[in-house]
Image: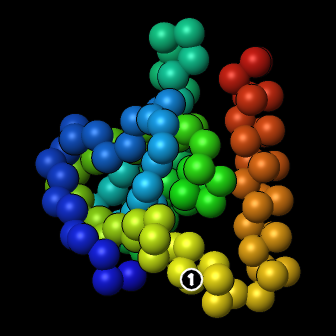
Amino acid sequence: MAGKSISLKAGDILITQGEKSPDKAYMVLNGQLEIYTEVDGRKQHIAYVGPRQVVGEVALIDGSPRTAYAVATVPTECDSMDRRTFDACLKESNPFVVALLRVLSARYRALMKKVEQQ
């Protein structure tokens, strides 16, 4: 991705749920992140992500607030892609692929709302 590399210690927060105007997505190079949401003060584990997995993609696609936290569980290094680079990639992409990304992010957000309401 050729972005800025970020080093995290265990417990460091990479992404904060509700963060507005997100401008980056991240790929884990090594280590592990826990992805979770907080609803009514309760932590809901979503997943663990590791090397070659991406986090923060939904907010980068649609520009809406972050849907979850991403916290390092062990020392972790991530690469980043900023909005300008992402938008440049989209401009070069097939319009069908761009439409797919937007539909998938909208469906994901709808699913997350249902999970939060349960």
x and y, in percent, of residue 110 in the image: 80, 38
Which residue corresponds to the image point at 55% horizontal and 38% vertical from the top-left? 65
| Count of numbered tags | 1
Q: Residues within 10 Å of mark 1 (few under 14, many from 20)?
A: few
Q: Looking at this view, is 56 or 116 the one in front?
A: 56
* Placement of the C terminus among the 4 image quadrants: top right
Q: Looking at this view, is 54 or 75 the one in front?
A: 54
Please say if 22 is above or below 114: below
Q: Is residue 30 visible?
A: no
Q: Which residue is mark 1?
A: 89
Asked which secondary structure carries label 1, the reply is: helix
x and y, in percent, of residue 45 in the image: 52, 34
Label 1 sits on what residue type?
Answer: Cys
Instruction: Name the side, left or right, on which 92 lies relative to 108.
Output: left
x and y, in percent, of residue 31 in the image: 27, 62
Which residue corresponds to the image point at 18% horizontal and 53% vertical from the top-left? 8
Where, by quadrant of the figure, is residue 82 drawn? bottom left
Please say if 57 is above or below 30: above
Where, by quadrant of the figure, is residue 7 drawn? bottom left
Q: Is residue 69 visible?
A: yes
Instruction: Name the side, left or right, on which 52 lies relative to 31.
Output: right
Instruction: Name the side, left or right, on which 46 lies relative to 99.
Output: left
Residue found at the very far top of the displayed protein? 40
Please say if 29 is above or below 25: below
Please say if 114 is above or below 68: above
x and y, in percent, of residue 83 in the image: 47, 65
